[in-house]
């Protein structure tokens, strides 16, 4: 267990303690204010170089990380895979070595293979590696920003300062994660974060979209999705990973939607205080009804906004490693 | 030629053992007796404290030549084998191109003759190992090939496997099967279980192996053709095969050292060095294999020596090729798994005598130009011998490997038992643990 990510890599949420997660959330709170300023910039990482390597397509995560790095005054090296030598057959190790030779402090890595971020961290032990999503494995900053968003909403409702609330708002919180758990790195990171923070986590999915070893996960599998909707404080929907072949794990998208989609009709079952989340990009009409995405209980855009302070906090803690010079 | 005197070792026979000297002259054992006087010009090898037995025979070596010479050649693989105590290797046919015809098999046999060891060849079962049409098994058998395999993958189509067995039976050859149903294995890269789900790696279920084992046992029963089950990795596979042997079916099998030394948790660091097919299994299977070895329930140990160029093992886990080195450590790992006070008879049985029987290498075959292996250490036998120190402790180091590749999962591991000398084709190839 890691009790703080200061000066560490961020590769997975599986080995982060509650304290380590709360530290990131609290640090992110301090950066929320920066994002409201006219001049949205602090000198925390001035002179530091962050390389953003996205071997897999992404718009929001990449933009979010690069925005976060720039707001911390870091220089950003951005490698677009299409224009890189990866297309010419260069290995991951050589690509990293080349970027490293330019002089960098951190790598933000998105890769289609599980474990790629850990492998890269072995190639460049002197560089901080931040996993921006690796295969089906982990998407740590998404897990953190989801927890951050939940704490933000609950603390506003309670009229308390989120940064002072620690993990108490998560204690016994009922979280339901729905959909393609098997192929979702977001689910793996969300479940790790929520369970470390003290939530009760349940999952709902067709049998084929549950991981084969779900009995070893810190979750309960619900049989009745509709009943579980009445139970949940937080409903986390997942993107059906059609690009990873999830389509063949269910007979049809229509049947998936009828069984596990959050339709407008199903929202009747939600508790009045329930929060609906989705990491995006959404398959509107598949896992979530278009109209549901626009209901007040859905905090999807807020998740996107919170991506920036969370990634600022992660970059700041992993790269700067100390409190000096903040804000 | 030359003469060697192996002095003062425990000569391990199929049944009994005795401390004795072994005199080798011109490729044959000429005397086994207490206190033999060294003839003039004879090289004396100190075997005190060691076991002296038949050189090891590997039923499962990937020599990579032709096609992947950057990873291994027939020559480098033979030297790695000699250091590991082997005197004969069966080269797998998943080269590029595959060894699926007489010309290619002859090429490997010719190259093999120039190495210090005897190199036998397993021919491909199907053309190009594509699993569609039978390769010319009879022509290759005529050349002396006694094992056939599509290893890398198994023959997936049950109808084709049935046909291959029916065709092979009158030829007196055996089909060595890599048991994994590829559709059920679903392109996975490690064992399906508690670790794979957490790591987000697609799993290869144990059932993918066991179903094909079960299928082929019944195909053997149906056709009477002989099968050798390669690298069995689960307790259940072992149980199924042992049960089938008790039914009297013509079945043999091997286990690989990595499956009885490493478990699926090795994959947690996403290091492709630990990627292998069938995959590393849960601890319970590893323990079951070790227990089977200790109790003499394992028929043979084969290395599944699978060299890969370093850049290929630098790929992400799911993209990297499967396989790891095995020749240089297989005997030590087997000795360790046999426990304290290891049984020397079991040791030579699983590493030499049974593999030699299965590969039909016990007797000289002039067509494939090999000498006899896996026999008793008695006057008149060919001098394919190993001197093994069961008590030596040492540390495996990748920089000490003789293979061209370095994808060994054992770098830095403590080892028990070490090859002190290897005599192959009547010549001393390894002495004092190093190549002569």
Image (tube, helix red, strand yellow):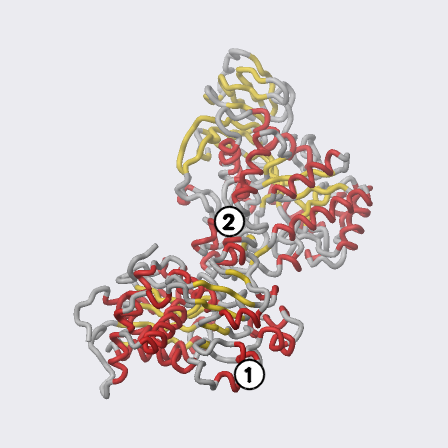
**Mark 1 chain:** A
User: Residue at the location (36% across, 70% down)?
Assistant: A108
Q: Is residue B413 left or right of residue B293?
A: left
Which residue matches tag 1? A264
Residue furthest to the left: A325
A110 or A260: nearer the viewer: A260
Query: The N terminus of chain B lies in which quarter of the figure?
Result: top right
Label 1, residues with CA under 10 Å away: few <14, some 14-19, many ≥20: some
User: Residue at the location (70% across, 50% down)?
Assistant: B212
As drawn, the label of residue B92 is none
Q: Nearer the viewer, mark 2 or mark 1?
A: 1
User: In this figure, what is the number of numbered marks?
Assistant: 2
Q: Does residue A3 appear in this view? A: yes
Q: Is residue B407 left or right of residue A160?
A: right
Which residue matches tag 2? B264
| Residue B80, image x, y percentages | 50, 40
CB under 8 Å between callouts 2 and 1?
Answer: no
**On screen, residue B418 above or below B148:** above
User: Residue at the location (53% across, 69% down)?
Assistant: A228
SS for callout 2: helix
**Mark 2 chain:** B
The CA distance from mark 2 to mark 1 is 44 Å
User: Residue at the location (60% across, 42% down)?
Assistant: B112
Q: Does residue A104 appear in this view? A: no
| Residue B164, image x, y percentages | 78, 50
B117 or B241: nearer the viewer: B241
| Residue B158, image x, y percentages | 76, 54
SS for callout 1: loop
| Residue B207, image x, y percentages | 64, 51
């Amino acid at each position: 267990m890691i009790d703080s990510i200061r000066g560490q890599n961020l590769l997975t949420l599986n080995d982060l303690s509650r304290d380590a997660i709360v530290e990131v959330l609290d640090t992110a709170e301090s950066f929320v204010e920066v994002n409201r300023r006219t001049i949205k910039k602090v000198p925390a990482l001035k002179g530091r170089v962050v390389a953003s390597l996205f071997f897999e397509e992404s718009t929001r995560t990449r933009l979010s990380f690069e925005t976060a790095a720039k707001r911390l005054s870091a220089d950003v090296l951005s490698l677009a895979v299409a224009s890189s030598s990866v297309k010419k057959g260069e290995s991951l190790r050589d690509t990293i070595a080349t970027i490293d030779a330019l002089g960098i402090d951190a790598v933000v890595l998105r890769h289609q293979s599980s474990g790629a971020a850990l492998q890269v961290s072995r190639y460049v032990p002197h560089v901080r590696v931040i996993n921006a999503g690796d295969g089906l494995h982990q998407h740590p900053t998404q897990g953190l920003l989801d927890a951050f968003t939940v704490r933000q909403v609950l603390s506003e409702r309670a009229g308390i300062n989120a940064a002072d609330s620690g993990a108490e708002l998560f204690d016994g919180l009922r979280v339901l994660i729905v959909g393609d758990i098997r192929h979702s790195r977001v689910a793996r990171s969300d479940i790790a974060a929520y369970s470390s923070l003290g939530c009760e986590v349940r999952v709902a999915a067709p049998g084929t979209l549950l991981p084969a070893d779900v009995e070893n996960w810190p979750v309960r599998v619900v049989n009745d999705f509709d009943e579980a909707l009445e139970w949940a404080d937080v409903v986390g929907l997942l993107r059906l990973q059609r690009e990873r072949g999830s389509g063949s794990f269910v007979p049809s998208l229509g049947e998936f939607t009828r069984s596990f989609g959050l339709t407008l009709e199903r929202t009747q079952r939600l508790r009045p205080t329930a929060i609906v989340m989705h990491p995006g990009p959404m398959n509107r009409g598949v896992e979530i009804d278009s109209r549901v995405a626009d209901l007040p209980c859905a905090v999807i855009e807020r998740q996107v906004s919170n991506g920036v302070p969370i990634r600022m906090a992660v970059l700041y803690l992993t790269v700067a490693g100390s409190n000096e010079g903040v804000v | 030629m030359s003469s060697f005197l192996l002095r003062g070792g425990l000569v391990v026979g199929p049944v009994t053992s005795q401390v004795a000297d072994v005199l080798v002259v011109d490729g044959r054992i000429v005397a086994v007796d207490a206190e033999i006087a060294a003839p003039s010009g004879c090289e004396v090898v100190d075997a005190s404290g060691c076991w002296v037995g038949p050189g090891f025979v590997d039923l499962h070596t990937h020599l990579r030549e032709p096609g992947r010479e950057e990873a291994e050649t027939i020559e480098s693989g033979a030297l790695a084998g000699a250091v590991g105590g082997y005197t004969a290797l069966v080269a797998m046919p998943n080269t590029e191109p595959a060894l699926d015809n007489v010309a290619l098999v002859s090429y490997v046999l010719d190259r093999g003759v120039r190495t210090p060891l005897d190199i036998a060849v397993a021919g491909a079962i199907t053309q190009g190992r594509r699993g569609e049409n039978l390769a010319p098994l009879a022509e290759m058998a005529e050349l002396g090939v006694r094992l056939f395999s599509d290893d890398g993958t198994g023959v997936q189509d049950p109808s084709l496997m049935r046909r291959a067995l029916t065709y092979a039976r009158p030829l007196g050859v055996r089909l060595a099967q890599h048991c994994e149903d590829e559709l059920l294995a679903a392109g996975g890269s490690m064992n399906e279980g508690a670790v794979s789900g957490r790591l987000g790696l697609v799993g290869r279920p144990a059932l993918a192996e066991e179903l094909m084992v079960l299928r082929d046992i019944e195909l053997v029963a149906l056709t009477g053709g002989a099968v050798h089950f390669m690298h069995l990795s689960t307790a259940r596979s072992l149980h199924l095969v042992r049960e089938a042997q008790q039914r009297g079916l013509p079945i043999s099998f091997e286990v690989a050292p990595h499956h009885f030394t490493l478990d699926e948790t090795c994959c947690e660091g996403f290091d492709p060095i630990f990627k292998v097919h069938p995959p590393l299994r849960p601890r319970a299977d590893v323990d079951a294999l070790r227990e089977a070895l200790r109790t003499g329930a394992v028929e043979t140990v084969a290395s599944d020596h699978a060299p890969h160029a370093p850049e290929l093992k630098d790929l992400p886990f799911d993209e990297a090729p499967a396989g790891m080195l095995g020749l240089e450590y297989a005997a030590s790992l087997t000795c360790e798994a046999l426990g304290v006070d290891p049984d020397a008879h079991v040791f030579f049985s699983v590493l030499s005598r049974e593999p030699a029987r299965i590969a039909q290498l016990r007797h000289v075959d002039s067509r494939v130009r090999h000498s006899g292996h896996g026999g008793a250490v008695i006057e008149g036998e060919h001098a394919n011998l190993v001197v093994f120190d069961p008590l030596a402790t040492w540390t495996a180091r990748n920089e000490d490997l003789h293979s061209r590749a370095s994808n060994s999962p054992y770098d830095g591991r403590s080892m028990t038992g070490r090859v002190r000398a290897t005599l192959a084709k009547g010549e001393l190839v390894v002495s004092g643990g190093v190549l002569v």
